[in-house]
């Protein structure tokens, strides 16, 4: 194979066809206009040109997953030189997976051989590069928005390893991100924009791609060159039926090579009741209470059900008691408490004592004496904009103040409500004790009066004495203990690892999503059967007792980017939300026996506001979002359709049907039962409907339907959208 990695080609309007042919469409044409919008790029705008770029080689064996950030590919020299210190306007792209022969001629790799589960592609300048993230690093802000529903595996950093600048670089036009129609539908789904709109990039220099490919090519000599699907060996947990026209491997079944380790979460509660669905055993009670002694087993309606403790004694109540946490038959309402945490990442710790009779909270803070440090209450990320107490270092005067943090910004200094009881140096540690009222009539301050369970906290340490950008930060749980009242020990669910990699899900309750109500197996590591968490780089999707067939397959992903000189094109920004909020994937359960085939339909629903699907820095004082491109993503062969509604008006914004291949070899990209998805498109061009303006507080509803004749793992239902911010 020749070592060519990129090719520059420039044409005029009538001089070129689409790379993938005439295979595209849109789902919402303007039927009142006799002129159709063209999905041939040369016919949309005569000023459009293109360049092509290839990924590095992908080599795989049968049943192997390929999912990693590949080395950067320099863009064509003509492009780099032409747009040095200038903006390029990207108006669309096409993508395929190809073999390249010794003469440099490309041929498409059938999707029955290599299944593109998804890709994340980037154009960027030279300001930053991608770095690998630790496999078990937890980031509560990471909801899968930059890695196809999964936790980010790589970050766009500056080489220091201390920050992730991807969102900043996207915001500042130093990188572009491409993830629309990026799964099995990728070759035949339209990725273009109408006239007057573009993604903008300063000084383009590199192409990066993080593909997720699954090798499904049968290596039996009888079938190895047949583009029709022929199943190879399958793991026992494959959900595909015997007569399936698709490979069960594309759903990432968890095989016997998968090893799960499960950790049980818990919380202390001093008000209300534990979740009735998550009971705790007597054995767990002894392990999880702060007093490691055998629980006193009782049957008493005055003590909370299951596990609790008070004044150094553990209780395990077998009675189905109605007593609430925090009460001891002489006390009602919220209770006095103390709480502590010690964060070994930042070396910051804190303790709290709250007296409900006086409504005074005393807060002790411990951190380095020479650097500033801070503790934020009731938060797991800066996006929560939490109430924070900051202690500055010795050379900055050891000042102590209250701050409301911004979303990845310093935020605002708050009016002082704390009284400093002590501010002392103990070796290299600065210990500060402050007090304030528990309740303050302002949302800017944390309300200690209504604390009912453990408190989420963040701590940070700076690189200087004065308050500035943090050097390190971390999250911790401040464990709470009732004073002279029963503290319940509650089962707070389970987390764990799959083959040593953290299992991270964030299934949201209604109205945001309904996977929790449906008790979808994907939300819980104990019931997780298949999907991206069982499908990491170079993992083999076969059972331990199955031998992987020999035979390498080598190919590349090929992108053609359409561009124009930047003049007055409006800047497109990305909007993203998951109907499977916010799990990143979900299982489609098999319909009950005896269900008529036409009624074997499974649906999920999500509700959110427009402001929830964009980087909040775009919002500011702007009015809203004008939707230009909306494409859902789902997988073959179960996907039926996806709908997006304006909940405030009841109007249907976008309906996309899954178009399944018929196996016609004379039609491009028509492999049987594999799908394409025509996006919705709005603009001023002939054949298009006018753009959809949505206020930031507009309520949206998404409904996704799947064929549930058979069980399916790892299905998806995300909306991948582009639009402009309206000032």
Image (spheres, rainbow, N blue to C red):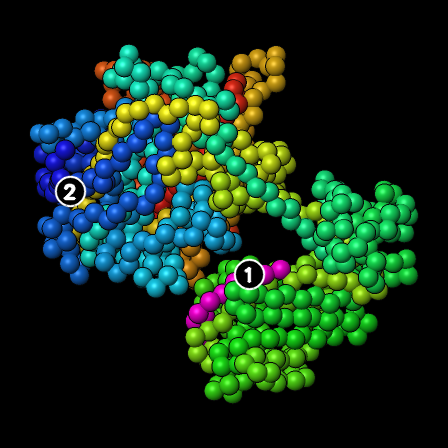
Of 258 and 397, which appears nearest the observer? Answer: 258
Question: How far across and down, in percent of the image, does residue 52 sit?
Answer: 17, 40
Query: What residue is at 56 percent from the left and 70 percent from the top?
Result: 348
Disc 1 target residue: 475
* Residue placed under numbered mark 2 in the picture: 6
Q: Main secondary structure of the magenta part?
A: strand
The residue range painted magenta reads 468-477
419 and 510: which one is in front? 419
Q: Name the residue located 90 percent from the left edge and 45 percent from the top edge.
A: 299
Residue 705 visible in the picture: no
Q: How many marks?
A: 2
Is residue 471 placed above or below 122 in the rendered structure?
below
Q: Quadrant of the N terminus?
A: top left
Residue positioned 62% across, 33% down in the render: 518
Relative image position of residue 105 (x, y in whole percent): 12, 29
The question of residue 469 being in magenta is answered with: yes
Circle 2 crowding by C-alpha within 10 Å: few under 14, some 14–19, many from 20: many
**x then y, percent, for residue 298:** 89, 47
Position of the C terminus, as image quadrant, is bottom left
Could you say whether the residue bearing mark 1 is in a helix, strand or loop? strand
- Residue 383: percent from the left, percent from the top? 50, 60
Please indicate, yes or no, whether residue 208 appears anywhere in the rendered image: yes
Disc 2 secondary structure class: strand
Q: Quadrant of residue 341?
A: bottom right
Mark 2–mark 1 Cα distance, whole angstroms, equals: 44 Å
For the residue pair 699 and 126, the one nearer the viewer reads as 126
Question: Looking at the image, is mark 2 or mark 1 earlier in the sequence?
Answer: 2
Give the side of residue 334 with respect to residue 434, left or right.
right
Vertical order, 251 against 208 (above or below) = above
């Amino acid at each position: 194979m020749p070592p060519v990695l990129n090719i520059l080609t420039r044409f005029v309007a009538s001089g070129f066809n689409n790379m993938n042919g005439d295979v595209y469409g849109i789902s919402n044409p303007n039927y009142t206009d006799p002129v159709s919008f063209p999905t041939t790029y040369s016919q949309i705008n005569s000023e459009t040109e293109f360049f092509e770029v290839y990924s590095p080689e992908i080599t795989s064996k049968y049943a192997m997953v390929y999912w990693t950030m590949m080395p950067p590919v320099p863009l064509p020299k003509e492009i780099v030189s032409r747009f040095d210190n200038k903006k390029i306007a990207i108006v669309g792209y096409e993508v395929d997976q190809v073999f390249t022969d010794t003469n440099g001629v490309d041929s498409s790799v059938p999707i029955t051989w290599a299944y593109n589960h998804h890709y994340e592609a980037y154009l960027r300048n030279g300001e930053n590069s991608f770095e690998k993230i630790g496999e078990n690093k937890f980031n509560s802000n990471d909801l899968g928005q930059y890695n196809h529903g999964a936790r980010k595996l790589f970050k766009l950093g500056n080489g220091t390893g201390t920050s992730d600048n991807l969102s900043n670089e996207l915001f500042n036009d130093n990188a572009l991100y491409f993830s629309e129609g990026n799964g099995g539908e990728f070759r035949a789904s339209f990725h273009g924009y109408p006239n007057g709109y573009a993604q903008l990039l300063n000084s383009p220099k590199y192409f990066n791609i993080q593909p997720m490919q699954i090798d499904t090519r049968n290596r039996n000599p009888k079938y190895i060159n047949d583009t029709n699907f022929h199943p190879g060996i399958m793991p026992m947990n494959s959900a595909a039926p015997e007569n399936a026209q698709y490979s069960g491997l594309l759903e990432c079944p968890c095989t016997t090579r998968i090893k799960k380790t499960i950790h049980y979460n818990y919380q202390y509660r001093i008000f209300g009741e534990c979740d009735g669905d998550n009971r705790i055993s007597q054995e767990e009670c002894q392990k999880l209470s702060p007093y490691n002694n055998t629980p006193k087993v009782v049957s008493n309606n005055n003590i909370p059900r299951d596990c609790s403790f008070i004044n150094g004694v553990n209780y395990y109540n077998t009675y189905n008691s109605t007593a609430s946490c925090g009460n001891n038959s002489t006390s009602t309402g919220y209770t006095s408490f103390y709480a502590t945490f010690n964060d070994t990442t930042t070396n910051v710790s804190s303790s709290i004592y709250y007296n409900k009779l006086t409504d005074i909270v005393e807060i002790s803070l411990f951190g380095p004496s020479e650097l500033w440090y801070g503790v934020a209450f009731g938060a797991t990320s800066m996006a929560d904009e939490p109430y924070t107490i900051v202690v500055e270092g010795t050379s900055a005067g050891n000042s102590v103040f209250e701050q409301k943090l911004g979303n990845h910004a310093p935020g605002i200094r708050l009016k002082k409500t704390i009284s400093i009881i002590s501010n002392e140096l103990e070796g290299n540690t600065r210990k500060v004790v402050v007090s304030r009222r528990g309740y303050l009539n302002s949302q800017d301050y944390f309300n200690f009066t209504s604390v009912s369970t453990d408190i989420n906290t963040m701590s940070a340490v700076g690189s200087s004495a004065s308050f500035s950008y943090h050097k390190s930060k971390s999250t911790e749980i401040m464990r709470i203990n009732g004073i002279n009242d029963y503290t319940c020990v509650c089962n707070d669910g389970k987390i764990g690892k799959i083959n040593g990699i953290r299992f991270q899900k964030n299934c949201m309750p209604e109205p945001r999503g309904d996977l929790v109500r449906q008790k979808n197996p994907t939300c819980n590591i104990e019931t997780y059967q298949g999907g991206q968490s069982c499908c990491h780089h170079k993992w083999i999707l076969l059972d331990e007792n199955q031998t992987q067939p020999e035979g390498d397959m080598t190919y590349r992903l090929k992108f053609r980017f359409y561009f124009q000189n930047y003049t007055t094109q409006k800047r497109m920004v990305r909007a993203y939300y998951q109907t499977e909020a916010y799990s990143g994937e979900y299982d489609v359960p098999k319909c009950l026996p005896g269900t008529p085939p036409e009624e074997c339909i499974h649906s999920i629903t999500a509700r959110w506001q427009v402001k929830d699907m964009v980087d909040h820095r775009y919002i500011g004082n702007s009015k809203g979002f004008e939707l230009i491109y909306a494409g859902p993503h789902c997988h073959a062969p179960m996907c039926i359709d996806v709908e997006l509604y304006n909940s405030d008006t009841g109007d249907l914004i976008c309906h996309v049907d899954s178009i399944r291949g018929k196996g016609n070899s004379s039609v491009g990209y028509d492999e049987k039962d594999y799908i394409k998805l025509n996006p919705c498109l709005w603009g001023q061009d002939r054949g298009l409907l006018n753009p959809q303006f949505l206020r930031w507080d507009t309520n949206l509803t998404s409904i996704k339907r799947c064929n549930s004749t058979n069980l399916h793992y790892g299905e998806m239902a995300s909306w991948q959208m582009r639009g402009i911010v309206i000032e």
